[in-house]
Image (spheres, helix red, strand yellow):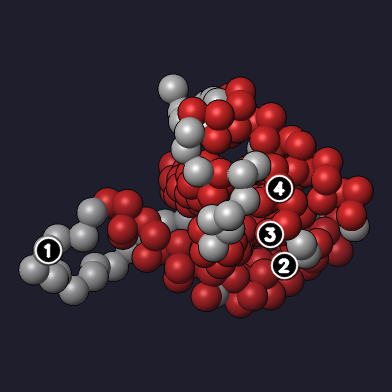
Amino acid sequence: MAKTADDGIPAWMVCVDILNKSKRELVTQAVETLESEVEAKRMDIKGSMVAVPDQSSDDEMKLFVIGQVLRNADQMRERYGGYIKEVHTKGPNATPQEVESAERARLLLMAVEKIEILVGYSRQLDAWINDASMEVAAKDPVEIFSKTSNSAERAELLGFILRNQQMMKEEVFTQEERRIIGQAVERSQSRL
């Protein structure tokens, strides 16, 4: 059972815990998206990395690959987007193989965009965790989230966390944590 401010845990710690859980889950979802693309054979991971004394874990390797995907995302969009457009321009003259390849490319680009969003949100949480940890005088986690989600980006991120289907399905947050996030979302939306 998660600790809450009602249990005598400082409100800032409750917020930091919620944000850390969110960050871990967003990164996990990005890794799972990568794995799905590899499994569907829309993405292939080839090559080798230089061995280092402490062997990289499988997750570290996947995070490295995600970094490479993010660095090459614009190039991938340009390359595959052009191909998709070319196939659609052919219309009924496109071969079944071209249509299938274009669909695979479209699905890959959607996965790349999903990974970009998830990693982008997880990166936003780093500064937010720091901001929430500075609110040591606050007694209410909702107040901390309300105060620290003072930008449209953070308000959007808080809403994304609350509505994230996978987080709900996996019960990442306790009922109390979901209540805190929900009230903070309401407050931040009323301000913007």
* Residue 163: image location, x then y, percent: 72, 36
Find residue 27 and report its horizontal and vertical position in percent: 48, 51
Q: CA distance from mark 1 to mark 4?
A: 43 Å
- The answer to whether marks 1 and 4 mark residues whose Cβ atoms lie closer than 8 Å is no
In terms of sequence position, does the residue under pointer 3 or pointer 1 come before the other? Answer: 1
Q: Earlier in the sequence, mark 2 or mark 3?
A: 2
Of the residues shown, which amino acid type is indicated by label 1? Asp
For the N terminus, the quadrant is top left
Taking depth in this image into account, of 160 and 138 the one nearest to the observer is 138
Using the image, determine if residue 7 lies above or below residue 62.
above
Q: Which SS class for mark 2?
A: helix
Q: Amino acid at mark 2?
A: Gly
Mark 3–mark 1 Cα distance, whole angstroms, equals 38 Å
Say whether disc 4 or disc 3 marks the residue closer to the N-terminus. Answer: 4
Residue 87 location (% of width, % of height): 77, 61
Q: Amino acid at mark 4?
A: Glu
Distance from disc 2 to disc 4, alpha carbons, whole Å, reads 44 Å
Q: Residues within 10 Å of mark 3 (few under 14, many from 20)?
A: many
Per the image, label 3 sits on a secondary structure element best described as: helix
Residue under numbered circle 4: 143
Residue 57, image x, y percentages:
23, 54
Q: Which residue is mark 2?
A: 81
Q: CA distance from mark 2 to mark 3?
A: 38 Å
Q: Image quadrant for the C terminus? A: bottom right
Closer to viewer: mark 1 or mark 4: 4
Relative horizontal placement of residue 144, taking residue 11 as reference (left or right): right
Label 1 secondary element:
loop
Choose between 149 and 137: the one closer to the eye.
137
Q: Which residue is mark 1?
A: 54
Give the residue drawn at x 32%, y 52%.
59
Tag 3 residue: 148
